[in-house]
Image: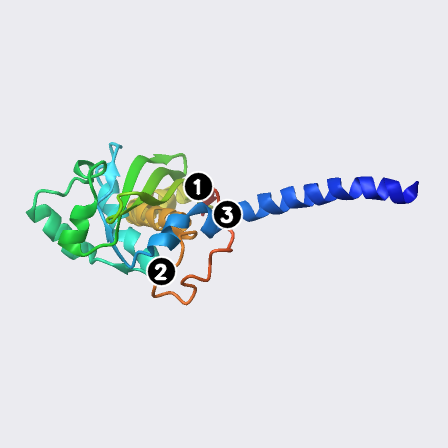
Amino acid sequence: MRKTRIAGILPAFIAIAMLFASCVSANTRGSMYPKMYTEQPTTILVMPPINNTTNVEAKDLLYTSISYPLIEAGYYVVSPHLAMEMLKAESAYDAELFFDKDAAVFARVFGADAVVFSVIDRWEKVGFGIETDLRYIVKSTKTNEILFERQCNLYLDLEQNSGGKGLLSGLIDLAASAINTALTDHIVAARKCNYYIFQDIPRGKYSPDYNNDRGKSAELRNTHVTVK
């Protein structure tokens, strides 16, 4: 009787274990972004962000900080300064014009294997912080397919402590600090968003993890974080 009971339980246990294993292994870089490994892009062009907000500075702030995490991930990124000059010269500064078009043009002009589009849906001060909502799409210049796509909703908490000073003194210091660091805070927000977005991108040719990181765990495509 005991052997029969164990024999009946064993298949169910194996099935549960296999289901659990599949759930655990589902969110890996290899399973989330298989086309990155198939095409293995080396050179990436970063397009100026598409700004859907009223914050006119957000576009340039974000653009200046997108390349660095991609370089750290092992990719050769076309110089943003060079790209900007060429795009402006061709009246192509607005990425909206190319978002739904064939990306092959970027291979011909810049020699890029892939192009990064970013969309700013929210960028504003909320309370003592900055609320951002950004989308990133990496498209192949060979197949025009999406290789990598993620969204980041990030809140940068900037609340400060007066450190035991009087209320008036604390408010004066807070106001002075806000004036002096307002731009810096937005730059920090942009950098942190880019870090969270690209932390899971499969590593490129110039990374020691190139082609060896398929099994590394990956976060969900939609990321929600609060940072200080």
Label 3: how many Cα within 10 Å (few below 14, some 14–19, many 20+): few
Where residue 16 sits, quadrant-wise, is top right
How many residues crowd mark 1 within 10 Å: few (<14), some (14–19), many (20+)?
A: some
Q: Can you name the residue that lies furthest to the bottom here?
A: 208
The answer to which image quadrant residue 122 occupies is top left
- The residue drawn where x is 24% and y is 38% is 50
SS under mark 1 = loop
Per the model, the C-alpha gap separating discs 1 and 2 is 19 Å
Mark on residue 160? none
Looking at the image, tell me whether mark 3 or mark 1 is earlier in sequence order: 3
Q: Kindly report the distance in space between the C-alpha atoms of the residues bearing marks 2 and 3.
A: 49 Å
Give the number of marks. Answer: 3
Q: In x, y percent, where is residue 77? A: 25, 58
Q: Which residue bears the numbered disc 2?
A: 204
Q: Which residue is mark 1?
A: 221
Label 3: state its secondary structure: loop
Quarter that holds the N terminus: top right
The residue identified by callout 3 is 164
> Counting residues from the N terminus, which is met first, the one under dot 1 or under dot 2?
2
On the rendered structure, is 76 left or right of 1? left
Q: Residue at position x 25%, y 52% from top?
A: 64
Kind of residue indicated by mark 1 = Arg
| Distance Cα–Cα, label 3 vs label 1 | 42 Å
Residue type, numbered disc 2: Gly
